[in-house]
Amino acid sequence: MTRIRNIILLATLAMLGPAVPGARAEQNEPKPVKLDAFPASIHLSDARDRQMIVARATYADGITRDVTAEAAITPANPALVRLDGATLHPAADGETTLSVAFGGQTVAVPVKVEHAGAHPPLSFRLDVMPVFMKAGCNTGSCHGAARGKDGFRLSLFGYDPAGDLFRLTREMVGRRINLAVPAESTLLEKATGAVPHTGGKKIEPGSEPYQTLRAWIEAGVPDDDVSKLPTVVSVELSPDKAVLDGEKATQQMTVRAKYSDGTDRDVTSLAVFLTNNETSAAVSPEGLVTAGARGEAFVMARFDTHTVGSQVIVLPKGLAFQKKPEPEGNYIDALVAAKLDKLRIDPSGLCSDETFVRRVYLDVIGIPPTADETRRFLAASEPGKRARLIDELLARKEFSEVWVMNWAEMLQIKTSLRVSYKAMFLYYNWLADKLAKDTPMDQMVRELLGASGGTFKEPATNYYQGTDDKLELTENVAQVFMGMRIQCAQCHNHPFDRWTQDDYYGFTAFFAQIGRKQAEDYRETIIFNSGGGETKHPVGGRVMKPKFLGAEMPDVAGKDRRAVMAEWLASPRNPWFATSFANRVWAQFFGVGIVEPVDDFRVSNPPSNPELLEELGRRFTASNYDLKSLVRDICNSRTYQRSTERNESNATDERNFAHAGLRRIKAENLLDAISLVTETKDKFKGLPLGARAVQIADGATSTYFLTTFGRATRETVCSCEVKMEPTLSQALHLLNGRTVNEKIKDGGVVKKLMEAPGLPEDKIVELYVRCLSRVPTRTELEKLLPMFAGDKAEQEKALGDLFWALLNSREFLFNH
């Protein structure tokens, strides 16, 4: 009987399931290989302080999961802290630890509590202004507009808190702020929707933001003692990376601000959350990220003047992925592979020798290989022939000419009302000489930005002839040499980056003492350090001391400020110089930068592979800023040598370099390529007959062909000056214009082929190798040979038509 009862009891327990909720799931669920708790340490500094805890598990396949709700969070001394869900509050002063455990993993978080009984007064700048930011009141679409909204204006994103306080408390006295009856203040009534408000309800009555505003009003709307007020020095967004498994997977973010007095604060409830890819990773106002379609997103949090971001990768639920073994050419391949593994993407294989030889010639020296050069490379069978070819091309003068053209675009080298043809030409030759002699990039930039003297005798000084507007000059220097577009910070704090007006005008101060005077020759200008002149902040008019972007305020007393700035800018102390230049070089060979556009480095436009970009910059610095060393590393990587053919896993990838991309050839290079294969010569202003288009010094000099195909006008420093998009005008010009048709006729290549011995098939092969660096396929030959069945005249016409067709083909017009 007892045995029967035991059997019944066991069966009943089996039907009821596990005694502990989730026990069965835990038995079947893989164990995490790592557990992280965010933040890694906690400091509570007053009675209002608190800290949200986020626990994240990482699994062997790289998937991460927010396990905060499932983790056991236990304070070692409950008398010091109070745990409300996953949020920690102070109870008494002291130090303890917080244990976070899940899946067999445990992490200890140090906790320090100070002034647990203190209730500091509310601060307008630290407590009230963040409410306006969170609610969107001071954005450009609301009261932050230049003229405000509905008669009320706030400074855009809070760049002028003193002005905001004045407008809140001194304009329309007694209405916006009602000190007698705080709850009837228009500020509160409109924000809660109690009275009509164009922006609708922004905060809930009784919510924490509401209580903050009301308490501040009840306290008499006090201003801050700015001299004693701590400022935000940094903001952390955690976790900084996440790999989510399937749609609807979530990850809570937490934001912590650190202040100049050593304290920190959980500002998750006050931060503004954004995402650059709503389809893949949406984020709620509370910082909860929810996975959507497969893809990659950058989730950002903005608080005070700081914007920080976190990379979020979303994969299909339970995606099976078996990494295919692939050799690595160098460090580039290892870092690209690490990112592709996270995305569960297999890279394409290597391109053929025919593809490689044409690709590397066009990228490194700007022209395709001749038929003889192609045959010589294809005939070589010894190992390492690709690396040897790269070295050969780097040693050719055409390599430096390509980069002279690139730099001339960035430096806006062209004639104008301010720059004479002679000054421009000397400037261009100075640049060409520096690159031909393999001058380290840092040395060249320091000589350029610190140059003084006449624009004829010291051609580098022409850099300061492009504009005498110090604000435009400031923006140009930041964009060209650090890849930053800081223009927004001229009028207000940058909405999507770290730069404030203080940063902008502090950097502008380096260019406030540039002196200019006319030399004996009216065409020449002398650039010198005037020793006088200051930059004033537009808000308040205070004189700004020179300050490096994101760095210290140097001693410039008795020094040329430009030389001090140049010494810092082109040095390892400036983290953006090497990485931004490496990014430009990378884009030259892939058609897209790791940061894209290449001159738009900002928090809200993150690199597609941060680790790769950082390592490229580090190695570029370690090589003494050697351009050829960087190009050699890129070209020798398997990443650069991949095929354009896509596989199932990388079919939609455009930013992670899993395959090579199709790139339309740049205007100057395309004209040079057509001239090379047709054996014709071009004549450009100031250059001898037969000069290449890439050698044109003056940005104001162009031709119909170059203009149609998007040659940079050099009007601005923006990378968008070079137009690479195919257009209908380009197609029509190639088909019916004079360039291709006349060059085929003038070059006489078809006549030479007809006079040479050999079968029609040999002549077809010769044209293919000349134009495309490959022989025709058997199918192509079978389709073409019937065209050559007639007499010699008909064969010559067919050969001319084939030549024209090859030059108009996408295979010729694109580098692949």
Image: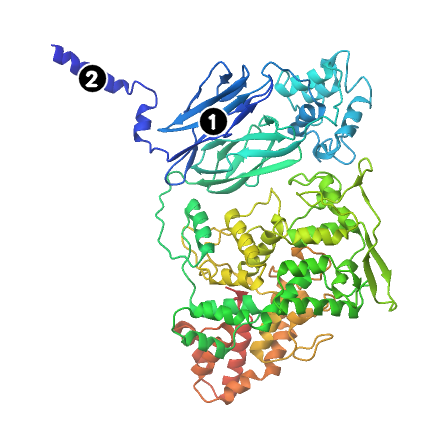
**Three-letter amino acid code at the position of disc 2:** Leu
Of 362 and 750, the residue lying toward us: 362
Q: In this view, does 177 lie to the left or right of 776?
A: right
Reading the image, the residue beneath label 2 is 10
Q: Which residue is drawn at 51% across and 67% down?
A: 360
Q: Earlier in the sequence, mark 2 or mark 1?
A: 2
Q: Is residue 191 above or below residue 684?
A: above
> Looking at the picture, how far across and down is residue 750, in whole percent?
54, 83
- Judging depth in this view, the residue of 482 and 688 nearest the camera is 482
Residue hosting label 1? 109
Is residue 812 shown to the viewer in this render?
A: no
- Using residue 441 as the reference point, say whether residue 608 is left or right of it: left
| Residue 762 x %, y % | 44, 82
Q: Residue at x 45, y 33 (%)?
A: 248
Residue mark closest to the camera, 2 vs 1 = 1
Residue at point 83%, 63% (across, down): 525
Instruction: Say if mark 2 contacts mark 1, CB within 8 Å.
Output: no
- Please tell me whether mark 2 sits on a helix, a strand or a loop: helix
Q: Is residue 116 above or below residue 511?
A: above
- Residue extending farthest to the top is 1
Q: What count of labels does the image hold?
A: 2
Whether residue 544 sits left or right of residue 295 in the image: it is: right
Q: As shown in the figure, which amino acid type bears the numbered disc 1?
A: Val
